[in-house]
Amino acid sequence: MSSLYMRVVVPATILLPLVFALVRFIYWKKTERLVFVYLLLSLVFNVISSILSKKGINNLPYLHLYTCLECMLLFAGFRTIVKDVKVSRVLLAGILLFPVFAAIYIFKFHSIYQYNIIPRCVESILLMIAAMYILMQKFIKENKLVYDFNFFFVSGMLMYFSSSLTLFALSENVPKTKELNYVLWNIHATLVLILYVLIAAGYYKLRPKRA
Amino acid sequence: MSIYLYVIIGMVGPLLLVAAMMWLFVRYKKNMLRQQFRMQTAALNHQKQLTKVIIESQESERKQIGKELHDDVGNSLASLRLFLDEHLVQYLEADVKAAYTKRIDAIFHKVRTISHQLSIVEIELFGLREAIFILAENISVPNVFEIKVEELECMIPDDLEYTTAVIIYRVLQELLTNTMKHANASIVNITFECMEETNELIIHYQDNGKGLDSKKKLKGMGFKNIESRLQIANGRFEINNAQTKGFGVTIFVPFNS
């Protein structure tokens, strides 16, 4: 049952934000476009990982690629929200430097066929900091509470990466007991589900701006 | 076993922490916005009260000046005329006498008009309805400048609060003054109707003059005065954008203002 939840149900829920995104297609701006691309990326890599996993092929090289692309897309998404020029430049630096860092780490110090703990943790920390900054700016500077797409997207990212950081950091250190592993990765799957639901809510909230 | 527990706590803990922080932030922001709104409302009400006091004291002063003009100056002019009639008539020719009598009467009439404009005695004596009809009659010049007052479905109420009645009167006075000074109009239509759904008195003012200069629209002191006065009565006005010739405005005043 828990395998079905983790391998089928949760990955399938990515269709929820995708459908809402397509329904609200005419109200998209830059951020919504980038998040849609991120969702498509997640879908594609989920499918690839499942197929390779069923065939008994090590799918970790694709996880390394996915980590780089995910970080670049999410930084680009945050960049469209941030108004400060300096912060925007920092995010641009992150988009350019993170893949370089991840590549150096994997090819020089690690193995492409092993789990990418350090890049994943670094990515999580950087995205958490960026998300917290954006939410603080939103709460402090805006004169009213606006539960718009940016709010749901950034909150979702903050919740997901802050909760998953511990798993990413310690996953190589936990003994590989099947049942207990399922518990951890099922919790991760639930976090992913929450993320997709929040992004879907963000797309649902898209409306034309009143004149 | 323990490392699994740490990982689970490490995953669930931050999730709950982030959710709690977001909830606290949202609550704090809502409270702040509520407080801001309350302060803004209080400031607005205070401003309204101040404006009301200023306008009420203005009206009181005008009433006093109007009364003094009527009583002192009017009486003095009447005594002057009597004095001249008694002491100088034997020394003057008939046409000279007629001339000074006419001039003194003209001054007396002007003083009386000004004192009535200042003190709006008609509202106190006859009520708003009659005061408006008298105003229209006094300003109208047959075949040159006509003011038509109409009542649709309900009569102009006489039981409005005195301040509200004065406000409506002054607003119409201001509009008529603007029309006479700037519009080059020959007809003014003032229509009164009652809106039961919103419990409002609606006044439509329309002249057939040259209309409002779009650059000066609503920036003049006259409109500012109208806006301030109507705010005291919780009323408002809208400029009519219809394609008719001339200038039109619709005024809304709640009955229970």
Image: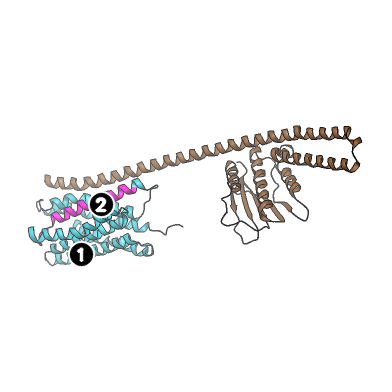
Chain colours: A cyan, B brown
Q: Which mark is residue A130?
A: 2
Which mark is first along the chain, 1 or 2? Answer: 1
Q: Which mark is nearer the camera, 2 or 1?
A: 2
> Which quadrant holds residue B93?
top right
Q: Chain of mark 1?
A: A
Q: Nearer the viewer, residue A148 or B184?
A: B184
> Where residue A53 appears, x then y in whole percent?
14, 64
Q: Which mark is residue B39?
A: none
Q: Is residue A119 magenta?
A: yes
Q: Residue at x 11, y 64 (%)?
A: A58
> Where residue A93 appears, x then y in whole percent?
22, 57
Q: Residue furthest front?
A: B91
Q: Residue at x 49, y 38 (%)?
A: B43
Q: Residues within 10 Å of mark 2 (few under 14, many from 20)?
A: many
Q: Amino acid at mark 2?
A: Ala
**Where is mark 1, residue-wise?**
A45
User: In this view of the protein, can residue A187 be seen by the observer?
Assistant: no
Question: Is B163 placed above or below A13 here?
Answer: above
Q: Amino acid at mark 1?
A: Phe
Q: Residue at x 79, y 35 (%)?
A: B77
Q: Is residue B250 left or right of residue B141?
A: left
Q: Residues within 10 Å of mark 1 (few under 14, many from 20)?
A: some
Cα distance between the residues tagged 2 and 1: 24 Å
> Where residue B220 appears, x then y in whole percent?
58, 49
Magenta span of residues: A110-138
Prevalent SS, magenta region: helix
